[in-house]
Amino acid sequence: MKRFRILLLFVFLLGTLMSSFSEALDAPADAELKNLLRELPVKEQEMYRVQPEDFYPILEYAVRRDYNLFELLNLSYLELEKMNKRLAFSKTVLAAIEEKYNLGGSKMHIVFPFEIMERLELGARLNKKDNPLDAFIEEKYSADFYGFGDLHEDTHFGFEKIELNYFRDAFGMHAKRMFFTFAVSHIKLYEPRHVAIHLKNFFKPKKETFWAVKKN
């Protein structure tokens, strides 16, 4: 009986812990991030070309909150969409940012190859061609897909829909394994710093841990 009670207590504590993870992920952007985004010198219905100094305070926020880049982009988009604002990061700006901050290292570069990225856009749709996240790279790209096979990205890739904890309706991204090709479907943020990359017509996602943004 004593062992049974201990087992019940363990199950209860485990359930409480998992619930706390879920609640943490379900939290919307807090007042600090909202204010940081509002302070950017961008007008409503405008795409703003970010300067490195503009984004350093937001990256410092991510460092304090222990967010990885996926989590920061996810929460930032949801606020930018409400504000009807859009941000564009040029190649030189991304390089300057990476000189000061580690955005996730080589693992993050597999999904976002900043070294060949011409432009990254995030925010509200200001015209029919815009998506919540658009990435433009200099040439078609491929890299080892965390041991699964190879990830291939077109010169324009991204996501047509972003919701809390989700990057949905991916385009321009697919994985190859032997003779098979699987389009990337969506990305789910299922625990702090834990990401599941879902492939169409494949039975399970590729799960990876992406470390939080850190100052170099």
Image: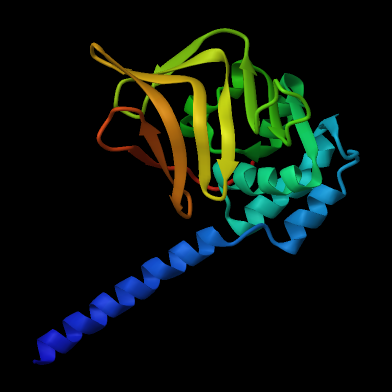
Judged from this view, the residue extending furthest toward the top is 139
Give the quadrant of residue 53: top right
Image coordinates of residue 78 in percent, x first then y, are: 67, 47
Residue 216 visible, this angle: yes
Judged from this view, the residue extending furthest toward the left is 1
Give the quadrant of residue 48: top right
Q: Quadrant of the N terminus?
A: bottom left
Q: Quadrant of the C terminus?
A: top right
Left or right of 92: which side holds 195?
Answer: left
Left or right of 198: which side holds 148?
Answer: left
- Looking at the image, is 177 positioned above or below residue 71? above
Image coordinates of residue 73 in percent, x first then y, are: 63, 42
At horizontal 60% and vertical 38% (from top left) the residue drawn is: 102
Q: Nearer the viewer, residue 90 or 85?
A: 85
Left or right of 156: which side holds 179?
Answer: left
Left or right of 31: which side holds 98?
Answer: left
